[in-house]
Image (tube, rainbow, N blue to C red):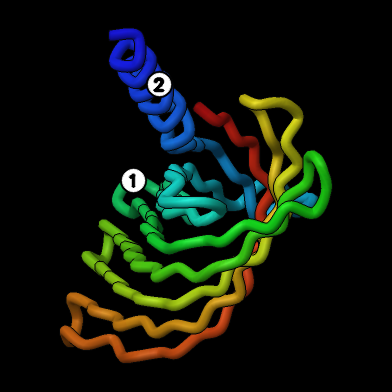
């Protein structure tokens, strides 16, 4: 009977330890990029979920900017750009609080420019593939800061209300961002 009680308690204790070690880390945060002397040109909110040891899925919600300008009574210019990026990153511990991460992400984007006085509308849809390289400093178990760069290559398709097809363009870009991270 004692052996059965001991075996049962060891199984329960082992299950409790296994349940604690399999808890997945999640991170949310805000990044600022395009920082220059005129101000910040865009920002991103992100969500990361640990898949297994040192591997995370990353989702970034990007806003490339919003503009609104009036030119007289009849002319209003509106422009907006947004994107969504989904990828995977792998982390390496450099020291007790500093991590290096790298990975890839697929980026989908759209932008719209509308001018009301002359009834002009331009829509652009794009797709890109980016490589992620970053450093993350963990202050404690809840808060971190990170800096990352994402060189990417992509293509955009333009659509206009004038002739329908605005053209195709290929591009190379590099985003550098600084972010604040909250882990839970």
* Image-quadrant location for residue 29: top right
Q: Report whether 157 appears left or right of 10.
A: left
Residue at x 63% of width, y 72% of height: 174
Above or below for 141 versus 40: above
Task: Say if residue 69 shows up in the picture.
Answer: no
Report the front residue among 37 and 98. Answer: 98
Residue 131: image tag? none
Report the front residue among 169 and 136. Answer: 136
Residue 92 lies, in percent from the top left, at: 68, 58
Q: Residues within 10 Å of mark 1 (few under 14, many from 20)?
A: few
Quarter the N terminus occupies: top left
Residue at x 54% of width, y 68% of height: 103
Q: Report whether 30 appears left or right of 84.
A: right
Q: Report whether 166 appears left or right of 65.
A: left
> Circle 2 sits in a helix, a strand or a loop, which is it?
helix
> Circle 1 sits in a helix, a strand or a loop, which is it?
loop
Q: Residues within 10 Å of mark 2 (few under 14, many from 20)?
A: few
Report the front residue among 70 and 59. Answer: 59
Residue 59 lies, in percent from the top left, at: 41, 52
Residue 18 lies, in percent from the top left, at: 42, 32
* Image-quadrant location for residue 180: top right
Task: Say if residue 78 shows up in the picture.
Answer: yes
Report the front residue among 89 and 119. Answer: 89
Residue at x 34% of width, y 9% of height: 2
Residue beneath disc 2: 10
Residue beneath disc 1: 73
Residue 171 lies, in percent from the top left, at: 50, 85
Mark 1 and mark 2: Cα distance apart in space:
78 Å
Q: Closer to the N terminus: mark 1 or mark 2?
A: 2
Residue at x 35% of width, y 21% of height: 7
């Amino acid at each position: 009977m004692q052996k059965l009680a001991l075996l049962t308690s060891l199984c329960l204790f082992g299950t409790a330890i296994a349940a604690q070690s399999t808890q997945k880390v999640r991170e949310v945060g805000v990044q600022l990029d395009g920082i220059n002397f005129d101000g910040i040109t865009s920002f991103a909110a992100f969500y990361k979920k640990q898949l297994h040891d040192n591997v995370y899925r990353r989702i970034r919600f990007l806003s490339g900017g919003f503009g609104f300008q009036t030119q007289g009574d009849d002319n209003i210019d509106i422009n907006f750009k947004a994107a969504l990026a989904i990828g995977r990153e792998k982390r390496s511990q450099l020291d007790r609080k500093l991590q290096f991460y790298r990975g890839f992400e697929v980026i989908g984007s759209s932008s719209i420019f509308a001018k009301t006085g002359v009834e002009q509308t331009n829509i652009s849809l794009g797709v890109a593939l980016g490589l992620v390289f970053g450093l993350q400093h963990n202050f404690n178990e809840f808060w971190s800061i990170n800096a990352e760069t994402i060189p990417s290559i992509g293509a955009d398709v333009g659509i206009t209300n004038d002739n329908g097809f605005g053209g195709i363009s290929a591009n190379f870009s590099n985003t550098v961002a600084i972010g604040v991270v909250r882990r839970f």
